[in-house]
Each structure stands twice: as C-alpha cells, then as structure tokens.
Image (cartoon, helix red, strand yellow):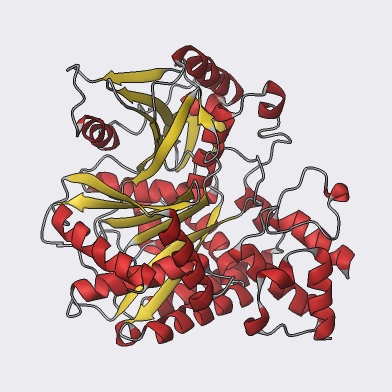
Amino acid sequence: MSDSQQKIVQGLNPADYFTLAMDEEIRQENMPGSLCGFALELSKQPDLEVLQQRINEFGLKFPLAYASLQQKGKRFFWYERAESPNLFKHYAAKKNDTADFHKTVLLDLINEKHDREAILPISFHLISSEHKSVFLLRWIHPFCDARSADLILKYLCTESEQQREKFDFPKLDSLVNRQLAKYKWWQKIALFFKAKRYITSLDTLPSVIHADTQQTPERLNYQTYSLTLEQTQRVNKLARQQVGLTGTSLYYIGCFMRALYRMNPEQAGEAYCAPYAFNLRKNKALSPVLGNHVGALFAQAPKSILDNREALFQHLKQQHTQVIREKLDYAFLPVMWAASWLSLAKHGEQLRKAYGTGGERSSFWFSDIGRTDVSEMSFFDSEIADILHLCQVTSPPALAFLSCQFNQKLSFSYNFVEPLFEMQWIEQLHDLMLDELLME
Amino acid sequence: MKEKIREFIFEDLIFVAEPEKFSDDDDLLEAGLDSMGIMRLIMFVEEQFTVTLPDSEIDPDNVRSFNTLEQWILQHK
C-alpha cells in the first residue's frame, strides 16, 4: 500500500491504463506483466563511465523513471521513491564466449517477476562477454510506449548536452488527454458509441488463434531475423506496389496473416485480426518522452480471402482508409478514457475481448517501430550491430510480431509464449513469412 | 491553401523545430511524413478543399513538398 507521506509524481493517462489492464491480464496468467525491451547488440563494451553518467542524468531529468506504481482508491499513480539510477551489469562467468549467454540473460530479464509496486518502471542492463555486449532497456508498458523507449535511447545516445535539453521541452501533457480536450462532451459520447460499434462489429467474426490454449503459459521466448539490404529494398518496393504509400505496416500484417494461414489453413476461427497502435506524437518530435500516447486500430481479414493475396491487400487497404476516414482511430480514445475509471478486470472486459473468457480478438500482436532513431549512431564508443525488440504478450494470442528498420535493413522479432508456441513452429512460420514478404 | 496545409502538417503530423524556415520545396518525407501521416493529410485536404485525390496517384512525388502537393490538388480542383 502507498505510504501517505510519499509524493505522487504523476497519474496515469487513459492509454497508460489500457496497457496497465494488459499488465494485469498477463500477471493473472502467472507471467511477469507487460515487460518490454529494446536490446542493442554492440560491437564492443561501451564506455561504462559515460553511460552511467548519462543514465544518472536521465534519472534526474525524469524522476518518473524511478517511481513506484501504486493504487490509491480506484486510480493508479506513480509515487516518488528513493532509488538511485543504475546500470545493471551481467558478465559471462567463463572467459570464452558462450553462444547463448546473451540470449539466456535477456530471456531471464524479460521473464523476471516483480511485484507491480516494486519493479523499476525502466531499468538499464549491460550483458557482456569477452566478444560481445548487449545493452537492454527494459520497461513496463504503463510507463511508456515503444516510441518513448526509442526516444529514451536517443536521449542516452545524444552527445551534446544542449541537444539533450531539447527532450521534453516544452513539456507536454498526455497527448491522449489533449486530443480528448478538443471534443465537446457530446462529441466524446458520439465517438464512444462509434468505437463500441466498431469493436462489436470486429467481434462478430471469431478470430483465428494458433496458440495451443490448452497449455499453461510458462515463459516468453523470442527469435529475431534481419533481412539483407537487397531483401529490404525488395520488401519496400513490393509493399509500395501492394498497399501503396499510405499503409506500409499493412504489408507486414497481410504477409503475416497469410504466413499464419499457410501454417494451418484449417485452424479454427473465421478471421485474422491484428491490432496496430497509432502514435499521437508528431513524427520526429522529442516530446513527450514518457507515457503511452496511442490509439488502437485493427486490421481484420476473413479467412475466405486469405488465399488471394491481391484481394487481401486490397481489403486491408480499403479497411484502413475507411477507419481513418471515419476517424475510428480517434474514437478509441474516449473508450479508453471511460474504461480508465473501471477496475482493471472490468477494463479488460470492456476493451479486450479476452479478459477471463479465454477468447481473444487479436490473432497476434503487431508493432512496427519504423526507422529506429538510433540506427546511425554509435553507442558510447561502440558500434550498434543490431537491434531487437521484446514484449510480453497475453495468452492467447501468445504471439507478437515486431518489426523495425535498422541501418536500412528490416529486422523482425517474433515474441512467443512457451509452451503455447514452440521455436520450431516459429522458424517454419518465418520461412513462410519470408516467402510472403519477398513474393517467392 | 498552402498555409492551411502547412498549419495542419506542423500542428498534427510532424515536428519541425523552426517551421517558418521550412520552405515550400523542402522534403516532407525526409522531415518525417510517414504512411499514416499521408493518409491523414489526404483526408484533411479532401475535406478542406472539397476535392477527391485518386488513390492511384498517391505517390511520393505528389506529397514530397508543399509545392508538389499544391500542384496535385490543383489538378483535381
């Protein structure tokens, strides 16, 4: 329970609550909650002294980073606590580099269980062996979204103090609240019902779920793949041809739907459905650094059109255009706001089909981080060789597909909950995904 | 027309430190206009200027700068 002497640093915004409801859902499955991670593979050990100084500075500038998430009445708040920022170091015990040392530690860290009140909202880890280092930025989703994490990395990597001062200046409040404030109360109500109708219509088609839901979730695992420059150029070209300039994420979603379908066309369910969040931050803005500033959209495709690649992309594109035209993306915001006054269980029931029912709207979770901002930077005197993304996911769907473009090459992270999915199945899925992406 | 579009893009879509220094020929895609932003921009233009921009013409060259965008819109006015 919160100590009445503790100072509240900040309340949660409606999008933070949305991710908190998912944190609760994951915890109910005896998993660690909504832990996420960005990991940078480095060519050598970075300059630890400067890195630690930069982390200290980040903590001073953003005290929320060391706050404790606690419930007071029905609401949740970030409470101040005396915790000094730190870089956690993990070294290989043996002198020789073991091939799986870094992955083992990464998996341990992303599967680490902590009480919600005790966990650091964000923590920094360096995993080092003789030949390789991995820097992990691990956070809990109510603290920030993926774009925030990208901004934090960018902040750490920015050498000029003057440039670093531009982060979060001017300080912006929650963009979800700012957007909501633009509407009159009756407009909010109209949007609310519009969004409810949208969600209800999505739920008329039961989603195809490939996870073996008879199994109990045990542990998150991941597999990453990087495409070559030539492959990436080909994918970008095909994406442009298939879905046009306005929906490159839809290309990945469509290809992933088809790859899943090819894994087992007979899998129960009537449609593939994938959420794709849209971020309310202006592109290239350095602010707000922290918090979740997202609305949700869904791509849904009936199984009957999965066989026809052209028809699928045409359908996804039309659906996306319609959603934007009808402003259904913004419509989700008042629903998140209203649900933020409910208990986490009720919130889950209202916004997520899954909570306590064993059902699930999403066939998989999807996030396209886009061109990552650290791609052309060095990391404290060390070159960034690769980047990977991690996220805990509810079961079902027990599967998340995360993409980004790093150093002009596409990089994919498959995150999956074992034993609902097994590595061998994921590897087969990726082979099909590659076929789909490259049209081979 | 260009002023309204400028205001929308810099207010809602991309962050530019000094928008007044962003010329009508500067590259909007380089500045951060992405696929979702282009979609919003097209919706905004269609509503504001009562024009329909054909999907088949949504091309980087048509949305690359304020000038090319204006030309594209005028073709359909």
Pick whichever, B14 or B30, lies toward us.
Answer: B30
Residue displayed at 71% across by 34% down: A169
Vertical placement of residue A30 versus A238, above or below: above
Vertical placement of residue A288 versus A9, above or below: below
**Quarter of the image where the N terminus of chain A is located:** top left
Pick whichever, A32 or A383, lies toward us.
Answer: A383
Q: Quadrant of residue A275?
A: bottom left
Q: Is residue A64 left or right of residue A44?
A: right
Residue displayed at 39% across by 59% down: A366
Q: Position of residue B28 (x, y in %)?
A: 73, 58
Q: Position of residue A193 (x, y in %)?
A: 54, 73
Residue displayed at 55% across by 39% down: A376
Residue sitting at the far left: A214
Q: Quadrant of residue A114?
A: top left
**Quarter of the image where the C terminus of chain A is located:** bottom left
Q: Is residue A308 left or right of residue A181?
A: left
> Can the viewer see residue A422 in this picture?
no
Residue sitting at the far front: A230
Q: Is residue B6 left or right of residue A118?
A: right
Q: Is residue A215 left or right of residue A249?
A: left
Q: Position of residue A262 (x, y in %)?
A: 23, 75
Q: Position of residue A53 (x, y in %)?
A: 53, 14
Residue displayed at 66% across by 27% down: A164
Vertical placement of residue A72 versus A337, above or below: above
> Can the viewer see residue A154 in this picture?
yes
Pick whichever, A434 or A52, lies toward us.
Answer: A434
Vertical placement of residue B1 versus A127, above or below: below
Total numbered labels placed on residues in the image: 0
Pick whichever, A433 or A44, lies toward us.
Answer: A44
